[in-house]
Each structure stands twice: as structure tokens, then as C-alpha cells.
Image (cartoon, rainbow, N blue to C red):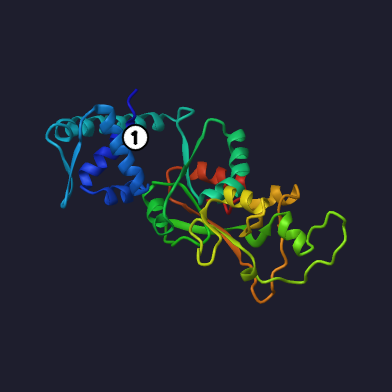
């Protein structure tokens, strides 16, 4: 079966002559672009590019032989998509959402599921777009909705609203440290510590966080929660990310020294008010209660 996405990546790399520039245009990571090119080369059994100091150049035996036909095929597919979408047939409408992976998993997943139940014919696609690229992606229609920790740059088309959702961070630990500081006690005895200093505890740092002094670093939220529950240390993350584990008694909120307050970060949603999908986006914002409908 033909994987159209691989050919799209190939075409953009050929057009831009650079993996980095192709990644920027496609709003995906450079490793993802490189992997797609290698996958297509393996599938076709031929090298499509020559890697030179000038960048990515089409190979004589592979890339140059197929580039014209790939371009024509992609244009035909784009024309077909536009024609079908213009007819308003069910199952061809899609909302592309950009949000940090953890935010989508722990905050937006249930809201997105509610929308899908109400509009089963509308597809939802999660896209990874860098925060500094959100305004451009919304303006060009690469994405339809952006949820982030900072209000997106606005203009006459792109607008941002607070979602009303706050990510309240807390230091979380398993029973080992909860018992040590009397947050949790099997016997029910013990006076909780009024406050503790994070620097006195082994820390688990999430991927992208400050790793200095961390006992474990570079892990995702799920792994961090498992490590904390197992007694490997404490992790700083929004409480909503660990709501289930806190409710089940697997993780506990530690009392931290007041001079080191945990941050509370608001979430914002941004959309293009002049999008052709205006009514669909408005319905999405209304059902998910993420912000003011456009």
C-alpha cells in the first residue's frame, strides 16, 4: 500500500534541499523527516538523495527519476481532497489540534472524546508544532486549534482566549517519602511536616526540565510517576497530570517550603477566526469548553 505521507516528506525535502527546512515546513521534528526518507528509500530499494555539504540533493538513480511523478500525484491528491471536502460529505472533516503531549493526554483527552461522541464523522488529529510556530501554523491553516501555556501572538485573524484551566504544580512522591514526612502513615500516627526543602530530596526531572542535581532525568510524565511511586524520588508536575494516582493513594503531595512556591500556569487556546472551518471550530470550542467560540 502506498504511504502518501512518505512521498509528501520526500517532495518537501527535495523542494527545500534540507531536512531542517523540510521539518519546519511540515511542522514535524527533523528526526521524523529523516526517518521517513529512510523508510521510503528502504521501501523502494534505492537511495533518493545524496547527502552533501550543500544539503540534500536528488540522486540520479532514485530521486530524479520519481520527483516529477510524485509532484503530479500530490497535486492530484490535493485537488481530490479539496473537491471532496467542498461537497461536505461526512467523514472528510478534520480538526487539527496542537497541544503539548501531556496536556492532551491528561487535560484534553476526555474533552476530545466528548466531542468525538457528538460529532463522530469529524476526525481529530494531534499535531506537534513548536510554540513559536503556532501563530504561523494557525494563520496558514496547518492547524485549527492551539492549546499552550502562553497566549499565542494575535492579529486580525488569530485570536487567543484563556481556557480557565490552571496547571497547579506540586511536588509528588510515593509512600516512602510521604511516610518520612508524615504525609501518609499506615498507623495514622505522626504529625505532618509543616514544610520541606526540595533540595533535600532526590529529584526526578521530566524531559525538558532543569536536570541539574536530578537523580533521574529526561523521562516522560508516566515514567516519572511510576518512579516516584516506587520511591525513586520526588517529581514536580501539575497535579492534574497525576490526579488518578493521587486519588488511588499511589502518589502524595508533599508540603514544600513556602519560600519556594510551586507555579500555577494557565492554559490558553488560540484559533483562526477567519478559518474556512469557522463553524466546526466553534462547535469544538463549545463542546470542549476550552474557550470563547469563534
Q: Farthest residue in the bottom direction?
A: 259
183 vs 98: above or below: below
Q: Farthest residue in the left direction?
A: 60
Q: Is residue 86 left or right of residue 167?
A: left
At x 34%, y 29%, the residue is: 3
At x 64%, y 73%, the residue is: 260
Q: To which quarter of the image does residue 73 belong?
A: top left
Q: Farthest residue in the top direction?
A: 1
Q: Is residue 24 left or right of residue 59?
A: right
Q: Position of residue 30 (x, y in %)?
A: 33, 48
101 vs 122: above or below: below
At x 61%, y 35%, the residue is: 118
Disc 1: CA contacts within 10 A as few (<14), some (14-19) or many (>=20) = few
Q: Is residue 51 left or right of residue 213?
A: left
Residue under circle 1?
A: 5
Q: Position of residue 53 (x, y in %)?
A: 16, 52
Q: Position of residue 156 (x, y in %)?
A: 42, 59
The kind of secondary structure element at disc 1 is: helix
Is 49 in front, or is 265? 49
At x 28%, y 38%, the residue is: 37
Is 269 in front, or is 38? 38
- The answer to whether residue 8 shows anywhere in this view is no
Quarter in which the N terminus is drawn: top left
Q: Position of residue 100 (x, y in %)?
A: 51, 52
- The answer to whether residue 182 shows anywhere in this view is yes
- Numbered-mark total: 1
Amino acid at each position: 500500500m502506498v504511504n502518501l505521507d512518505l512521498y509528501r516528506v520526500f517532495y518537501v525535502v527535495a523542494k527545500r534541499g534540507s531536512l531542517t527546512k523540510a521539518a519546519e515546513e511540515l511542522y514535524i521534528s527533523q528526526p521524523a523527516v529523516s526517518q521517513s526518507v529512510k523508510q521510503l528509500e528502504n521501501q523502494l530499494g534505492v537511495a533518493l538523495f545524496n547527502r552533501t555539504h550543500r544539503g540534500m540533493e536528488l540522486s540520479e538513480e532514485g530521486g530524479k527519476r520519481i520527483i516529477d511523478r510524485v509532484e503530479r500525484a500530490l497535486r492530484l491528491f490535493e485537488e481530490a481532497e479539496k473537491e471532496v471536502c467542498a461537497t461536505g460529505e461526512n467523514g472528510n472533516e478534520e480538526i487539527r489540534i496542537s497541544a503539548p503531549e501531556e496536556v492532551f493526554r491528561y487535560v484534553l483527552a476526555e474533552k476530545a472524546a466528548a466531542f468525538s461522541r457528538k460529532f463522530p464523522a469529524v476526525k481529530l488529529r494531534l499535531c506537534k508544532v513548536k510554540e513559536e510556530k503556532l501563530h504561523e501554523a494557525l494563520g496558514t491553516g496547518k492547524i485549527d486549534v492551539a492549546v499552550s501555556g502562553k497566549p499565542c501572538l494575535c492579529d486580525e485573524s488569530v485570536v487567543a482566549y484563556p481556557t480557565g484551566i490552571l496547571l497547579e504544580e506540586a511536588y509528588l512522591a510515593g509512600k516512602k517519602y510521604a511516610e518520612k514526612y508524615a504525609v501518609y502513615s499506615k498507623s495514622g500516627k505522626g504529625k505532618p511536616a509543616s514544610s520541606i526543602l526540595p533540595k533535600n530530596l532526590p529529584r526526578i526531572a521530566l524531559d525538558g526540565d532543569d536536570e541539574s542535581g536530578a537523580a533521574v532525568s529526561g523521562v516522560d510524565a508516566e515514567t516519572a510517576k511510576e518512579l516516584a511511586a516506587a520511591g525513586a524520588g520526588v517529581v514536580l508536575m501539575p497535579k492534574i497530570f497525576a490526579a488518578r494516582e493521587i486519588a488511588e493513594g499511589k502518589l502524595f503531595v508533599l508540603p514544600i517550603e513556602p519560600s519556594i512556591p510551586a507555579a500555577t500556569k494557565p492554559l490558553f487556546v488560540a484559533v483562526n477566526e477567519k478559518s474556512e472551518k469557522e463553524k466546526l471550530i466553534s462547535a469544538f470550542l463549545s463542546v470542549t469548553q476550552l474557550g470563547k467560540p469563534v
